[in-house]
Every structure is written in structure tokens, then in C-alpha cells.
Image (cartoon, rainbow, N blue to C red):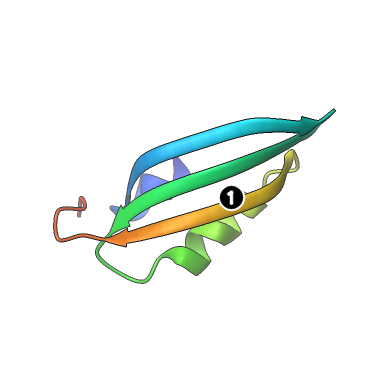
Amino acid sequence: MVIESEGDQVTDLHLWRLGPGHLGAIVSVATRGPARRRITAEIANSPTLSHVTVEVQHSLFANG
């Protein structure tokens, strides 16, 4: 997964259908650094995601 390419770790993921061709997502990520803006931008590149919420948990135990 692109989100985990820089050592961040997805801890929870919820997807649901909002309507034809549109999905919503809530992503929880454990990270050692400031990742919210980068992760949100990566997820927002998906043409089917219409609503995205990113929850960042700063963790000493994230990969990397």
C-alpha cells in the first residue's frame, strides 16, 4: 500500500459506498513523523474516493 511506503503503518481502514462510483474512507495510521498531509494527498488521488478522513497516531513503534 502506498501509505506504508515510507514506514508508516495502517492500523485501521474503513471504506463504504456513498453512491454509484463514490466511496468514503477513514484511515488510521501510526507514524513517527508528520504524515497527515502526505497521506491525505496520496489517498485523494483515487478517482473513486469522494470523502477521506485521516487519523494519525504518532508512534515510536511505526516501521522504519
Q: Quadrant of the N terminus?
A: top left
Vertical arrangement, residue 11 with respect to residue 45, above or below: above
Q: Quadrant of the C terminus?
A: bottom left
Q: Which residue is mark 1?
A: 43
Is 28 left, or right, of 19 in this rendering?
left
For the question of whether residue 45 can be seen, the reply is no
Is 45 left, or right, of 47 in this rendering?
left
Q: Residue furthest bottom?
A: 34
Residue visible at 59% across and 60% down in the picture = 41
For the question of whether residue 55 can be seen, the reply is yes
Residue visible at 36% across and 43% down in the picture = 10
Residue visible at 14% across and 53% down in the picture = 61
Is 25 left, or right, of 10 in this rendering?
right
Vertical arrangement, residue 2 with respect to residue 60, above or below: above
Q: Quadrant of residue 33?
A: bottom left
User: Mark 1, residues whose alpha carbon is within 10 Å: few (<14), some, or many (≥20)?
Assistant: some
Position in image of residue 54 (x %, y %) = 50, 55
Residue visible at 74% across and 38% down in the picture = 48
Position in image of residue 34 (x %, y %) = 37, 71
Nearer to the camera, 10 or 64: 10
Nearer to the camera, 45 or 54: 54
Q: Residue furthest right?
A: 20
Nearer to the camera, 4 or 57: 57
Residue type at mark 1?
Answer: Ile
Numbered marks: total: 1
Position in image of residue 22 (x %, y %) = 78, 36
Position in image of residue 37 (x %, y %) = 51, 68
